[in-house]
């Protein structure tokens, strides 16, 4: 049955590209609004929802559009900012000011001369990301967007969303596979006109973003920054619905794709900060997050599924580091599951979108281990539904793990 599953791009970030505010910024790990809709249809109670790994805010936006109160939690401060901007109610005045700010910024760049003191993000080897000409145009545009004469932060945020869209489109980065690569900056036939083209593109993107803000959100969404392993210390309420997609144990960086935005907007100031953030992210492996695995020890003993030990042992025969990586992933997910019980109402429905993994010749059945851990922690009505074939190794699939909670 698994081998007959299709890749189903309608269940991934690709389905959000033409879907209103969901289209603002591309993030490969994001799931589609359609998956949230499917979970809402199956949920027994819809009083207040929670997404403890909110990413780009898909769950919160869909819930708000259905009139369902929703709280979001995210460890990455850039994604907290993005989710808040995406789920905000915008007034006609803010949209008007956003247009004014964009036109002011474009005119400022057009009328300015090259500034050799122009601030640029301290991203490593920035010339691989943008040519010197593009750096100058983007740097000038970014500086103009922070004009002190515009005090409306909502208007500025909308412009910064458009700026991020333009910055990535004019970069040399390629995110079409697991390892980040760069295209060669060959001289462009249009290079003399690139300033004009970038500025026109920026205005187009700003108007696209604004066009998605005219419909009312419906129900307010709250977004909290924090580590969802300790979710009970972050959120102020109790919930009868959880819809989320936590990181997968696939040994990738959950900062990698966001680095250009995070450097431009000041959420990263040096490379080590990316590694520190990935260490706090379940399953993250950037920089220091990998080097620390050799010394890592679990916080607690005896909390894991019986399915986990043979998997870790097989991987350890090839690599202690990777065995520790898998062990830490499930250790952290177990902490999350332990603590989320404290913020659930009796009868709460939970939906976790997860993917399996493979290390050497050992398959890691993430969905089965997650369901087994949930069962051991008192969740009931467990099920694992295969959703789609992932665009990677032939054995890798995505699943929806669903469960319910009752107070012991």
Image (cartoon, grey):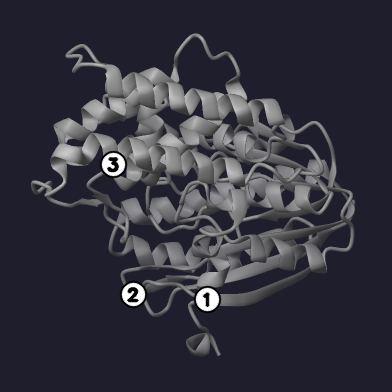
- Residue 33 numbered tag: none
Element class at badge 1? loop
Count of numbered tags: 3
| Residue for point 51% across, 53% down | 247
| In this rendering, the label closer to the viewer, 3 or 1 | 3
Cα distance between the residues tagged 3 and 2: 49 Å
Cα separation, mark 3 vs mark 1, equals: 35 Å
Say few, some or many: other residues with alpha carbon within 10 Å of mark 2 (under 14 / 14 to 19 / 20 or more).
Answer: few
Answer whether residue 85 is visible to the viewer in this image: yes
Sequence-wise, the earlier of marks 2 and 1 is 1
Mark 3 and mark 2 residues within 8 Å of each other at the beta carbon? no
* Circle 3 Cα neighbour tier, 10 Å, few/some/many (<14 / 14–19 / ≥20): few
| Comparing labels 3 and 2, the label whose residue is closer to the camera | 3
State whether residue 289 appears in this view.
Answer: no
Q: Is residue 102 above or below residue 166?
A: above
Nearest to the observer: residue 98 or residue 69? 98
Residue 197 circle label: 3
- Residue 274 appears at what percent x and percent y? 36, 33
Q: Which residue is mark 1?
A: 8
Q: Position of residue 401 (x, y in %)?
A: 67, 67
* The quadrant where residue 255 appears: top left
At horizontal 54% and vertical 33% (from top left) the residue drawn is 158
- The circle drawn on residue 361 is 2
Residue 228, horizontal then vertical, whole percent: 63, 40
Q: CA distance from mark 2 to mark 1?
A: 26 Å
Q: Nearer the viewer, mark 2 or mark 1?
A: 1
Q: What kind of element bears circle 2?
A: loop
Which numbered disc flags the more N-terminal residue, 3 or 2? 3
Q: Nearer the viewer, residue 111 or 61?
A: 111
Quadrant holding the N terminus? bottom right
């Amino acid at each position: 049955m698994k081998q007959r599953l299709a890749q189903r791009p309608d269940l991934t970030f690709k389905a959000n590209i033409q879907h209103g505010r969901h289209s603002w910024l591309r993030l490969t790990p994001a799931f589609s609004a359609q998956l949230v809709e499917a979970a809402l249809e199956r949920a027994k109670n819809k009083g207040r929802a929670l997404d403890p790994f909110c990413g780009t805010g898909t769950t919160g936006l869909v819930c708000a559009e259905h009139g369902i109160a929703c709280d979001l939690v995210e460890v990455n401060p850039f994604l907290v900012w993005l989710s808040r901007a995406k789920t905000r109610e915008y007034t006609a005045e803010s949209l008007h000011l956003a247009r004014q700010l964009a036109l002011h910024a474009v005119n400022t760049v057009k009328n300015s001369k090259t500034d050799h003191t122009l601030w640029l993000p301290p991203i490593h080897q920035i010339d691989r990301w943008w040519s010197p000409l593009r750096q100058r145009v983007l740097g000038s545009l970014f500086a103009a967007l922070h004009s002190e004469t515009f005090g409306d932060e909502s208007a500025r945020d909308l412009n910064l969303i458009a700026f991020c869209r333009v910055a990535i489109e004019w970069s040399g980065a390629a995110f079409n596979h697991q390892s980040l690569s760069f295209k060669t900056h060959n001289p462009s036939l249009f290079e003399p006109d690139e300033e004009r083209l970038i500025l026109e593109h920026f205005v187009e993107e700003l108007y696209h973003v604004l066009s998605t803000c005219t419909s009312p959100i419906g129900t307010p969404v709250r977004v909290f920054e924090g580590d969802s392993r300790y979710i009970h210390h972050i959120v102020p309420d109790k919930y009868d619905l959880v819809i989320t997609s936590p990181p997968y144990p696939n040994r990738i960086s959950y900062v990698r794709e966001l680095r250009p935005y995070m450097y431009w907007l000041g959420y990263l100031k040096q490379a080590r900060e990316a590694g520190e953030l990935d260490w706090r992210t379940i399953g993250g492996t950037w920089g220091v997050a990998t080097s620390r695995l050799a010394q890592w020890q679990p916080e607690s003993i005896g909390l894991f599924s019986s399915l986990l030990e043979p998997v870790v042992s097989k991987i350890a025969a090839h690599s202690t580091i990777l065995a520790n990586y898998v062990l830490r992933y499930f250790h952290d997910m177990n902490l999350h599951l332990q603590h989320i019980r404290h913020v659930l109402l009796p009868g709460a429905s939970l939906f976790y979108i997860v993917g399996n993994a493979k290390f050497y010749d050992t398959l890691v059945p993430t969905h089965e281990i997650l369901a087994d851990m949930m069962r051991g922690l008192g969740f009931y009505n467990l099920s694992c539904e295969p959703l789609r074939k992932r665009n990677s190794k032939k054995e890798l699939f995505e699943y929806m793990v669903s469960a319910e909670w009752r107070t012991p």
